[in-house]
Image: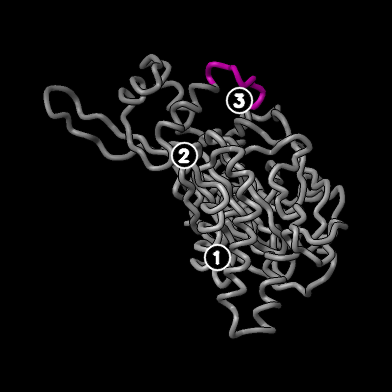
Amino acid sequence: MAQNFPVLIDAQGPRRGSRAHRLASAAPADVRLRNRTAIMRALYPNNSHSRAELAKLTGMSKVSTSDVVADLIEDGLLVEGAYRTPHGPGKPSQLLQFNVSAGNVVSIDLSDVTRIRGVVVDLAGKVMHRVEIELSHAKCLDATEVTKLCQRLVDMCEEKVIGIAIATPGTVNDDGLILEAPNLGWVDMDFVERLRGVADCPVVVTNDADAAVFAEDYFGDGFSDMILVQIADGVGAGLLIDNNVVRGKGFTAGEIGHVVMSDGTRPCVCGKIGCLETIVSAPILDKAIEEHPDDSERIIARAGKELGRALAMPVALTNITHVVFSGVPRLVNQTMVDAAQSTIDLLTRSRFLDAVQVQISTIGEDAAMLGAAGMVLRRVLAVM
């Protein structure tokens, strides 16, 4: 049976009316809302604490803790577990856990125009269902294909859908409007509105590289400062500084794929000639390897070198200590990492800068989907 619990922080703003959403009108500074968030964060995703322990951890009174816990249990977000026997005198205390099965998030990745992939995850980001749809390669992705996949995934959910997430290449504003996605052929694409009727829940639309770097932070190795480069149909970067995703003015931070390289010659979808994307994107590398299969290692190493050249300046500018590559394993491999590492070291290493570590994403191809789902969890439940 799906639980009906209140949305704490709604992507569309606070909801009003029904008892199921009784806290949605609370301002962010509301004490009770902060208390709910503090308790959920203390338990999320798999910690166990008694009511007395939660009171100590959060600084709340025992009465306030019991009241908030009762509400969260009623909403299905917490469950009571086993009793812990004390070492000394005293009564056994019942442990509480965050209920990761209380809801589902649907997340879709649009970074590859030849296929769209989607997952259903629980409230801890565990993948419950997965669907992939192959598409005919076209200059423009039909948005109805995304809507159909989203509905299919929603229908697979066994619990309440608390949010829908879309990870897309291109520029996305704070309202989730895709201002421009050249590789998909979109301008001003509004999935928040398109998906409004699919499920009664918030819709979060975000840049795929921003989502991937968020996922690497929360679900992966967890570096607080890093650049994640997403290598797919295009090339984008997500920048994380002090655990915060940097989006930049105009939401265009990380558009490294459209920086012109000195030896680039191919026209780019953005209108310029010789962008990084025309040298190291997945379709370009796949075509080169198909034409010269015996030179695959050299082709991938050259791509790593070009990425290293492009990243040297932002690495030096920010003193970022970790660079992470995300993409299909056939291309994003150790050969690419080693070439990028040696190039960045050659161009930036000095006594003024920290050493930089280049590595492959520990999450793999699911990074953008999981990161977008994580953004839903952060926005709706504030647990991240």
Q: Which of marks 2 and 3 is in front?
A: 2
Q: What element carries label 1?
A: helix
Which residue is pictured at 70% across the width and 44% down the height?
203
Q: What element carries label 3?
A: loop
- Disc with the residue nearer the chain's start (2 vs 1): 1
Residue 158 visible in image: no
Please state which of residues 350 and 292 is positioned toward the viewer in this rendering: 350
Which residue is labeled 3 in the image? 23
Which residue is pictured at 74% across the width and 36% down the height?
174
Residue type at mark 3: give it.
Leu
User: How far from the left and from the top, in percent, is residue 333?
Assistant: 52, 67
Please state which of residues 116 and 65 is positioned toward the viewer in this rendering: 116
As drawn, the label of residue 130 is none
User: How far from the left and from the top, in percent, is residue 219?
Assistant: 48, 48
Question: Compared with residue 84, is residue 213 higher up or lower down, i.e. above or below?
Answer: below
Q: Magenta includes 217? A: no
